[in-house]
Image (cartoon, rainbow, N blue to C red):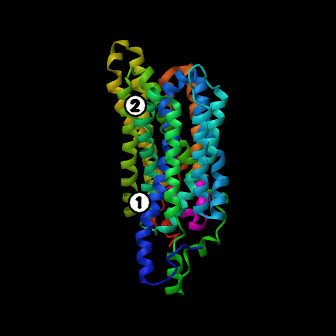
Amino acid sequence: MAYGLTDHGPLARGRAASHKWKVLGVGFAANASFSAAFSGIPTTAVYLRSAYHLGNDGLGLVLGTLGLGIAVSELPWGLLTDRWGDRRVLLLGLLSTAAALAGLALFASPSGSHVPGVMTLALGLLLVGLLGGSVNGSSGRAVMAWFREGERGLAMSIRQTAVPVGGGLGALLLPALASKFGFVSVYGALALAGAATSAFAWRWLHEPPHLDCRAAHAPHRVAPDATATKRRSPLFEPGIWRVALGAGALCVPQLAVITFGTVFLHDFGRAGVVTISLAMAAVQAGAAVARVWSGRWTDRRGNRRAYMRGCSALSALLFAALAFATGITGTHHAVTAFAAPIFAPMIVLGGVSASAWHGVAFTELATLAGTSRAGTALAIGNTCVFLTLFLTPLAIPLLLSLGSWPMVWAIASLCALIALPIFPRALRNDKAGAALIP
């Protein structure tokens, strides 16, 4: 059902062309507000350890449950989005996630001598992830519906840019809030952001009228979703699974930086709070710029698959260099004083490289599936991505106990390298894949 703009004339088409940017703004705000939670909370890792009396194992558990909740819920939310529409699902998800964060602020924040148990915190973050998993697929489907091929790479990359932007804001604000006002302010600020975003979604997120416009004025042309409905479900498309699994593997180095980058810089690099916050914010800011550029660049060149494979190779190289440098530093204690200036830029470069491809990959997923089933395809991709967010924080403490930081970054490099053959090879003309959706 279309809301408003029901006529099919030039005025309706002009309004639709203008309104699509509001829809993109809603998708951006929704992803940014949720990213501030799932990317921002890990940047408070040092304060989480002290405030909740956690070891590295406990820290990995509570950070991992947030990713587990998103991974488990992504596919059901995606299927529901294709059935109910993106407006209903996004509103439901934003409001319920804000309520869960408010519950954490009220009932799971350390106060005085009261320190909530690790399972209380883990279950609270699991609930946030379960409810917040609605945001990714529903906002992505809305953007894909309002933008045409040739614009979608840029639009989806802008939407995906919200993830590092939200994470960057979280990296700048949440550690300061945690250190000065405690975690009640951290969860409260995130809840307010989600509630505010839901108001924008209520006002501007509607179904696009341009499909009806094209059908009315060009009856000899097939509406975009008519061909999509004849395809197999994205659940049975090998190409979609290859992109999704490659994305999951390439997320390992990215999420290693996001979840334990602050711990690495603090414990191994001897960096202060200012350096750590600036480095993590730089990772997110750099990723945001790289995603917008890559979306526009691949729209022009039609080389999404080649770009994803290139990011895999570059990330593998950068994290191999980080593993080598970490190993050298660990055996020469005299250079420890210079560790922070060395490792902070390396963390930033590796984190940006391992994050730059997201918008391109999710555009490829939605293009392969078709607009009417984009929610399911995006959910498959996000399931793989956030399953990695669950597993990575659990694996890092184990790797630290076995071989310290050089092993962590070597495994991150290996995972980036594994993604290279998983991603489908570029077609002779990559734009042929784009033609699946008019």
Q: Quadrant of residue 395?
A: top right
Tell me the quadrant of the picture where the N terminus can be found: bottom right
The span from disc 1 to disc 2 (Cα, nearest Å) is 31 Å
Is 369 colored magenta in this rendering? yes
Q: Position of residue 412 (x, y in %)?
A: 50, 34
Residue tagged by mark 1?
154
* Quarter of the rendering containing residue 24: bottom left
- Residue with the mark numbered 2: 321
Mark 2, secondary structure of its residue: helix
Taking 59 as reference, is 243 above or below it?
below
- 260 sits to left or right of 61: left
Q: Residue at x 35, y 33 (%)?
A: 278
The answer, for residue 416, to whether it is visible in the render is no
Q: Is residue 272 magenta?
A: no
Packing grade of label 1 (10 A; few <14, some 14-19, many >=20) is: many
> In x, y percent, where is residue 291?
40, 51
- Say whether residue 298 is visible: yes
